[in-house]
């Protein structure tokens, strides 16, 4: 019989970076011995020694890859009971709580410190992925017939709803407080893009700020691409059926109350006038004329601190940076980057709140039914961005997509054209595209869906063939294979197009599956 060594994994590495003792959390006392534990035991031994920040970075990077290679076969999950799976999920969660505590001591002064921090973020994401995988496997095996209606956000028992012991009185969404930040993940490909767009991948695409009124009714203030900034009853957030939601809370209750109240009043005042504050595609958190989702939380706490006379409070502590290989994509999205500032531009990505030491994780909830969809889309967007960064890939909207987006752009400004568009378009473009979205942005979102759906279908086929959930490494390998095969087809297709028609009689020009919409520079 062995103790679970997962809780020592990242905690010991973090201790190496910050010169502190190992985190005290331990997992369940008895488990079966199999490949997963052999891997983790090796990781524990390797990371058990004191290391410099530079060594910390290199070591975590190596074992980060090991974590991402975990799948049903490697982990021998069939040997684990539901109770043991839940214990492992909870143990990994406790590691991340330990990381949050140790971030208060971690310095961020030298380049090695920054690399160590970046690696810790990656390990944090990898641990959550392992938890996701265990949750998906456990609920697919034990509750295969359940669907969305069986899982209500921030409620439930078991591994899919975990509460920080520091907040043991938190039982459900009913225990939310003013100033709580809700970090969540939407279900669209654009949500996956937002989650993976920074130098460090996260699993989140949206943030909301909670407000509790004098009647103890809960509301959220939030920004949506489709409709701009709105306030809504908490039931709207619950009804969105997101894949995941995490609650973050600061110890300063007075500051939190003021932040929640300030943003609720600001957003509601404009909403009541029928003039919602527009969504900020530029992700410029320093300009409050327009607001994106994380900026709602940023502005709420910034203004609350001013009102309370608290100087120097700015969230988050560590902001999102971008890869220069994504410059064209970022510019089309509307983000204010160029060749000159891409290296120094910073913004508040939703996932950044995870690593702000002033905010505790109160509880984390996942929808087991949605984890497969999230897993597929995370893998797809990760690979798309890697190809863009390393091989010069970019999106190239089709003629049809371009015409539809330009027509939609004009139609959103004309009631007559919108009524015509509704009759012929397959999508409800009135709600999908806001007035301040450009035709280029519309085209980008449409082609992102088109390319994403192709890869999603291919992963779905492979998983059905395997008859088990695909691990990230398996998905990455398959996506690379599809890219290589389709690139060869694309090159052949391009060459055939220049052959005179008379020489092509009887020959069929095979079209590539996705390279016409997403390809490297021609």
Image: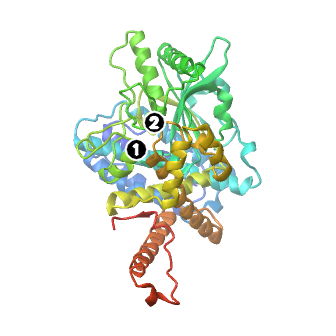
315 or 64, which is in the foreground? 315
Asked where in the image residue 27 lies, by quadrant, the reply is top right
Q: How many marks?
A: 2
State the residue position of label 2.
Answer: 354
- Residue 138: where, in percent of width, then height? 66, 53
Q: Is residue 126 above or below residue 452?
A: above
Q: Residue at x 55, y 17 (%)?
A: 269
Q: Disc 1, disc 2: CB below 8 Å?
A: yes
Q: Residues within 10 Å of mark 2 (few under 14, many from 20)?
A: many
Left-right relation of 166 to 138: left
Q: Residues within 10 Å of mark 1 (few under 14, many from 20)?
A: many
435 or 414, which is in the foreground? 414
Q: Secondary structure at mark 1?
A: helix
Asked where in the image residue 142 lies, by quadrant, the reply is bottom right
Q: Residue at x 68, y 12 (%)?
A: 215
334 or 194, which is in the foreground? 334
Q: Quadrant of the C terminus?
A: bottom left
State the residue position of label 1.
Answer: 121
88 or 392, which is in the foreground? 392
- Residue 402: where, in percent of width, then height? 48, 55
Whether residue 520 is visible:
yes
Q: Secondary structure at mark 2?
A: helix
- Residue 289: where, in percent of width, then height? 42, 25
Q: Quadrant of the N terminus?
A: bottom right
Q: Earlier in the sequence, mark 1 or mark 2?
A: 1
Q: Residue at x 62, y 40 (%)?
A: 416
Q: Residue at x 41, y 31 (%)?
A: 356
């Amino acid at each position: 019989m062995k103790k679970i060594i997962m809780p020592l994994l990242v905690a010991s590495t973090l201790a190496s970076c910050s010169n502190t003792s190992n985190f005290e959390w331990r997992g369940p006392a008895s488990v079966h011995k199999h490949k997963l534990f052999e891997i983790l035991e090796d990781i524990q031994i390797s990371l058990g020694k004191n290391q410099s920040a530079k060594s910390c970075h290199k070591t975590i990077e190596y074992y980060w890859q090991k974590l991402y290679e975990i799948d049903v076969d490697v982990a021998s999950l069939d040997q684990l009971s539901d109770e043991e799976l839940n214990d492992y999920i909870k143990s990994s969660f406790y590691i991340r709580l330990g990381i949050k505590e140790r971030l208060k001591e971690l310095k961020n002064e030298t380049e090695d410190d920054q690399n160590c921090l970046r690696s810790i973020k990656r390990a944090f994401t990898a641990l959550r992925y392992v938890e996701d995988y265990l949750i998906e496997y456990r609920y697919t095996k034990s509750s295969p017939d359940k669907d969305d209606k069986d899982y209500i956000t921030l409620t439930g028992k078991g591994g899919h709803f975990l509460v920080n012991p520091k907040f043991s009185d938190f039982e459900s969404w009913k225990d939310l407080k003013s100033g709580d930040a809700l970090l969540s993940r939407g279900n669209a490909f654009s949500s996956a893009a937002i989650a993976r767009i920074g130098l460090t991948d996260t699993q989140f695409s949206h943030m909301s700020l909670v407000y509790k009124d004098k009647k103890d009714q809960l509301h959220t203030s939030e920004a949506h691409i489709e409709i701009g900034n709105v306030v809504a009853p908490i039931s709207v957030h619950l009804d969105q059926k997101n894949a995941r939601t995490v609650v973050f809370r600061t110890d300063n209750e007075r500051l939190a109350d003021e932040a929640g109240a300030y943003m609720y009043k600001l957003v509601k005042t404009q909403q009541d006038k029928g003039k919602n504050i527009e969504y900020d595609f530029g992700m410029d958190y320093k300009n409050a004329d327009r607001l994106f989702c994380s900026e709602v939380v940023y502005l709420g706490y910034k203004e609350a601190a001013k009102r309370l006379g608290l100087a120097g409070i700015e969230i988050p502590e560590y902001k999102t940076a971008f890869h220069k290989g994504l410059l064209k994509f970022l510019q089309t999205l509307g983000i204010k980057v160029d060749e000159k500032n891409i290296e120094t531009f910073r913004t508040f990505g939703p996932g950044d709140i995870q690593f702000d030491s002033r905010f505790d994780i109160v509880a984390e909830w996942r929808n087991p039914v949605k984890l497969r969809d999230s897993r597929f889309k995370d893998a797809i967007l990760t690979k798309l961005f890697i190809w863009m960064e390393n091989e010069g890939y970019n999106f190239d909207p089709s003629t049809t997509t371009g015409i539809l987006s330009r027509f939609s752009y004009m139609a959103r400004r004309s009631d007559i054209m919108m009524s015509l568009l509704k009759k012929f378009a397959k999508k409800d473009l009135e709600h999908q595209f806001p007035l301040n979205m450009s035709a280029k942005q519309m085209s980008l979102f449409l082609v992102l869906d088109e390319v994403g759906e192709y890869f999603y279908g291919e992963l779905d086929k492979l998983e059905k063939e395997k008859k088990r959930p695909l691990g990230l490494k398996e998905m990455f390998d398959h996506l690379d294979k599809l890219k290589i095969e389709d690139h060869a087809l694309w090159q052949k297709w391009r060459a055939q197009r220049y052959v005179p028609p008379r020489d092509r009689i009887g020959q069929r020009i095979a079209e590539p599956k996705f390279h016409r919409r997403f390809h490297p520079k021609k």
